[in-house]
Every structure is written in structure tokens, then in C-alpha cells.
Image (tube, rainbow, N blue to C red):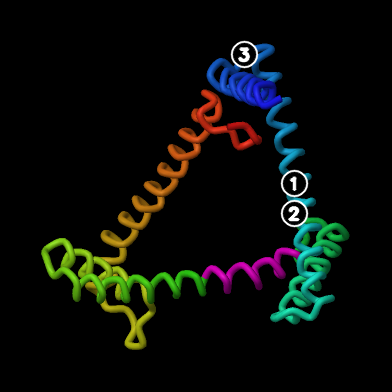
């Protein structure tokens, strides 16, 4: 059974890969069909995960475990979002406003936490190893934060120029590097599954 599962996974993976490398005729149609099946399975997995999440948190509420109030809030928010999303659709102005009201503050909080973590890491790095690379790291972090943060005294001309030619290119380069790393990691994981080196579907 494990050999059959490995063979099916490798065969379908090779078909999708061949459809991307040679997008002609039957291979293209097969690739599109398999990708559509994968999207349907992923959507079904999301639904199953949502019901599992509801079950876990409902059990916490029923057994009166710690932080059961947060579990109740999560269930209310999930049901509210699902009902209004199904009724109004994802493109309605109301759902977009709700999404922005939740996502934007969370993103801002995460970026603020990242800034504090960066400063803390710089201080610890200076205490442990005060060499040239550490000083460069601290200088880049300080200049980046000062150039990107809104200061009470308003914009400083020099820092505004730094934000234009220093912060933006390096931030864009870092983001592209992260995306390339994720792409290469996904490619490596996919090739390991295709060659049977990793079997996340239950084999050894």
C-alpha cells in the first residue's frame, strides 16, 4: 500500500511538472485538471480544519478550561465571518472594511514588534561581539528605523533621502530574497517527494 501511494504521488507530480515544462496539448489539459483537483482538495482541507478548530474550542468552553472566553470569542468571530462572507460575498464593501479593520492593525502590530525585536537583537549583538559587521548591522538598523518611522519633529531632509535610496532598495531586495528562498525550498521539497526521498503521505 505504501509503494502504491508513493507511485501515485510521484506519477501525478511528474505529470504536473511535465505540464509546466511542456505546456502543449494533452499535458496542458492534464496539468490544469490536476491543479484544479488540488485546489478543491485544499479547500476541503480548509473546511475540515475550520470544523476541527470549532470542535477543539467548543470542547474548551464545555469543559471550562483556561482561556475559554477567548475560545468563545474565536467561535463567534468565525461564525460571523462565515455567515456574512457567504451572504455578501468576498467582494462586498462591508467584508472588505471588516477585513481591513482586522488585518491592517495586526500587520502594524507585527511590524512594530519586529522593530523592537530588531533593536533588542542589535543591543545583544553589541554586548556579545563588537566587531565591524556588528557595527554595520546596528548602523543599518538605526538608519532604517529613523528613515521609515514618523518622527515628532517632522521629516528630516537627510533621512528622507536615505529612505528613498537606502531603505526601499534594501527592503525590496530582502523581500525578493525571502521569496526566492521560499520558492527554492518549495522546489526542493517537491523534488524530494517526486524522487521518493520524503513521503508525507504515510510511507517511510
Do labels 2 and 1 touch, CB within 8 Å? yes
Q: Calculate the distance from the C-alpha at mark 2 to the C-alpha at mark 3.
A: 36 Å
Specify start and end residues of the magenta stretch as a single range: 94-107
Compared across the picture, whether 146 is left or right of 21 comes to left
SS for callout 3? loop
In magenta segment, residue 97? yes
Q: Residues within 10 Å of mark 1 (few under 14, many from 20)?
A: few
Foreground: disc 1 or disc 3: 1
Q: Residues within 10 Å of mark 2 (few under 14, many from 20)?
A: few
Q: Calculate the distance from the C-alpha at mark 2 to the C-alpha at mark 1.
A: 6 Å
Question: Viewer-proximal residue, 24 or 110?
Answer: 110
Residue 22 point in image, percent of width and height: 56, 15
Q: Calculate the distance from the C-alpha at mark 1 to the C-alpha at mark 3.
A: 31 Å
Q: Residue at x 65, y 18 (%)?
A: 28
In the rendered image, the vertical position of residue 154 relative to residue 132, given as above or below: below
Q: Residue at x 52, y 23 (%)?
A: 195
Q: Residues within 10 Å of mark 3 (few under 14, many from 20)?
A: few
In the rendered image, the vertical position of residue 24 relative to residue 145, given as above or below: above
Residue 6 point in image, percent of width and height: 63, 25
Q: Which mark is residue 49?
A: 2
Q: Residue furthest top?
A: 25
Locate residue 56: give its quadrant.
Answer: bottom right
Residue 172 visible? The answer is: yes
In magenta segment, residue 5? no
Q: Which mark is residue 45?
A: 1
Residue 94 visible? The answer is: no
Residue 124 point in image, percent of width and height: 26, 74
Question: Can you say which quadrant of the picture contains the C terminus?
Answer: top right
Residue carrying label 3: 24
Q: Earlier in the sequence, mark 1 or mark 3?
A: 3
Amino acid at each position: 500500500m505504501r509503494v502504491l501511494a508513493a507511485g501515485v504521488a510521484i506519477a501525478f507530480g511528474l505529470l504536473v511538472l511535465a505540464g509546466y515544462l511542456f505546456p502543449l496539448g494533452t499535458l496542458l489539459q492534464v496539468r490544469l485538471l490536476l491543479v484544479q483537483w488540488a485546489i478543491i482538495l485544499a479547500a476541503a482541507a480548509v473546511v475540515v480544519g475550520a470544523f476541527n478548530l470549532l470542535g477543539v474550542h467548543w470542547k474548551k468552553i464545555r469543559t471550562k478550561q483556561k482561556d475559554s472566553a477567548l475560545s468563545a470569542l474565536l467561535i463567534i468571530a468565525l461564525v460571523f465571518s462565515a455567515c456574512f462572507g457567504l451572504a455578501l460575498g468576498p467582494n462586498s464593501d462591508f467584508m472588505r472594511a471588516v477585513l481591513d479593520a482586522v488585518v491592517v492593525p495586526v500587520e502594524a502590530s507585527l511590524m512594530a514588534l519586529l522593530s523592537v525585536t530588531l533593536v533588542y537583537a542589535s543591543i545583544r549583538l553589541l554586548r556579545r561581539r563588537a566587531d565591524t559587521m556588528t557595527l554595520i548591522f546596528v548602523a543599518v538598523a538605526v538608519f532604517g528605523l529613523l528613515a521609515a518611522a514618523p518622527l515628532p519633529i517632522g521629516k528630516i531632509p537627510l533621512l528622507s533621502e536615505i529612505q528613498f535610496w537606502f531603505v526601499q532598495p534594501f527592503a525590496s531586495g530582502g523581500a525578493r530574497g525571502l521569496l526566492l528562498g521560499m520558492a527554492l525550498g518549495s522546489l526542493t521539497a517537491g523534488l524530494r517527494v517526486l524522487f521518493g526521498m520524503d513521503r508525507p503521505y504515510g510511507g517511510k
